Image (cartoon, rainbow, N blue to C red):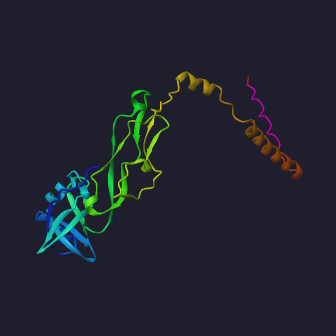
Amino acid sequence: MATATDISILEAQKREAGTKNAARRVRVGGKIPAVLYGAGKDAAAVAVDPRQVLRILRSESGHNTIFDLTLDSDRVKAMIVDWQFEPIKGTLLHVDLQRIAMDKRLTVTVPVVLKGEAVGIKTEGGILEQLLREIEIECLPADIPKNIEVDISHLVFGIEVRVKDLPHDPKLKFLTEENQMIAHITTVKEEVVVAPEAVAADAAAAPAEPEVIKKGKQEVEGEGEAEGDAKGKAKPEKAEKPEKKDKK
């Protein structure tokens, strides 16, 4: 596993905090609003260059990069802990920066990189499924790895790689649950397509309308007739109209 040793410099300037108009003015001026906190000091509203921030985020160590942040005459170690992009244009809108004490352990997430070609893919026709792409660790800032590599060449059906199987480094403490699965070999699930003939056969074999519905209707009619007989008010049948005779 490689360690994030490249240190960048991010320049920051104090800004007005608390209003959307103030943040808009910062962006119009070519900067983006940011908040700096941590190391037991008060939070500070600052403005930073989005191009410098993007260079850090797109670097090999990404948001886990430890860099020098300059503010007025102060220079501190810091890292990016949160950021926000505009959803349509994709422009960077805001970042959260944290002061870092190099002698204090901190919690970060690092990517898990799979190495090798699994036997289960080559000989059993399976496919590799990665379920966990990041894990949470605790370490000193200087020991933050760019990623954690794990060999999956031995994987076959029924064998998995879990967090407890990752290479052990005494400098790192894994915080993600050790039995959580990272990767395994699985099969492609085939979609069952029902033939039109089978659909037609199922429709033909479908039972007719339940007899209980017809019985229910008859019972209701019977109740009405019984009630009419009991009250002596059953309606007589209508007499047929006499046929008209042709006049000769």
Which residue lies at the image location 36% right of the left edge and 58% below the top edge? 137
Residue 107 picture quarter: bottom left
| Viewer-proximal residue among 80 and 236 | 80
* 154 over 98 or under it: above or below: above
| Viewer-proximal residue among 57 and 121 | 121
Please give the count of numbered marks on the rendered protein: 0
| Viewer-proximal residue among 136 and 205 | 136
Which quadrant, please, contains the C terminus?
top right
Report the magenta stretch's main SS: loop
| Viewer-proximal residue among 43 and 165 | 165
Could you say where residue 91 lies in the image, as x and y percent from the top left? 20, 56
Which residue lies at the image location 39% right of the left edge and 34% below the top edge? 118
Could you say where residue 105 lies in the image, as x and y percent from the top left? 32, 66
* 141 over 89 or under it: above or below: below
Could you say where residue 234 lies in the image, as x and y percent from the top left? 84, 47
* 40 over 48 or under it: above or below: below
Residue extending farthest front: 170
Q: In this picture, which residue range is highlighted in magenta? A: 235-246
Q: Is 159 within the magenta?
A: no
Could you say where residue 144 lies in the image, as x and y percent from the top left? 28, 58
* 129 over 69 or under it: above or below: above
Which residue lies at the image location 28% right of the left edge and 77% below the top edge? 40
Which residue lies at the image location 75% right of the left edge and 38% below the top edge? 214
